[in-house]
Image (cartoon, helix red, strand yellow):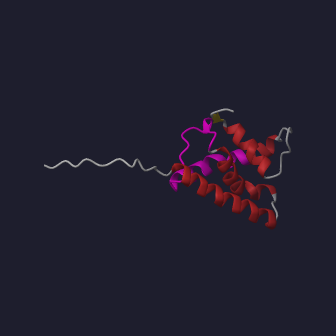
Amino acid sequence: MSEFYTRSDLVNRTLGKLGVRAAGQTPSAEDYDNVDGYLDSTLASLAARDIVFVADADAIPSAFLNDIASILAKDAASEFGVMAEEMSKIEAQAAAAEYSLKVMQRPTTSFQRTKSEYF
């Protein structure tokens, strides 16, 4: 398993979540470009809302891949004519993905005592 994934891996995973690409199939250039067009704005939105910051779209940490793909699927779903029932499922997965990313990014407690300095 790779430690990092590329932009192409993320777009392909997103197309799979949208049901556009079956396993083993190569997506059409138009479908790929439709999703790829949303990628930068989605990553910028996640960073602006302090959910997760991905510095390089060609070096996405493996822990973030599925969650970002779910959020990207929600953003790009309108390009693929997703029906209302399926859209509500995609939106629920995106909300769960945002929460998951927040949990992964929150600071941990060190449980160490703080030393005081008196002036």
Q: Residue at x 57, y 38 (%)?
A: 56
Quadrant assignment, res 61: top right
Q: Residue at x 56, y 43 (%)?
A: 54
Quadrant assignment, res 64: top right
Outermost residue to the top: 2
Q: Which residues are magenta?
A: 35-63
Magenta stretch holds residue 106:
no
Q: Position of residue 42 (x, y in %)?
A: 62, 51
Q: Residue at x 39, y 49 (%)?
A: 111
27 or 50, which is in the foreground? 50
Magenta stretch holds residue 40:
yes
Q: Position of residue 76 (x, y in %)?
A: 72, 54
Q: How many marks?
A: 0
**Above or below, comparing residue 77 to residue 23 in the picture:** below
Quadrant assignment, res 23: top right
Q: Residue at x 72, y 48 (%)?
A: 35
Q: Position of residue 78 (x, y in %)?
A: 75, 59
- Left or right of residue 49, residue 114 in this image: left
117 or 75, which is in the foreground? 117
Q: Quadrant of the N terminus?
A: top right
- Left or right of residue 45, residue 81 in this image: right
94 or 42, which is in the foreground? 94
Q: Position of residue 14 (x, y in %)?
A: 74, 47
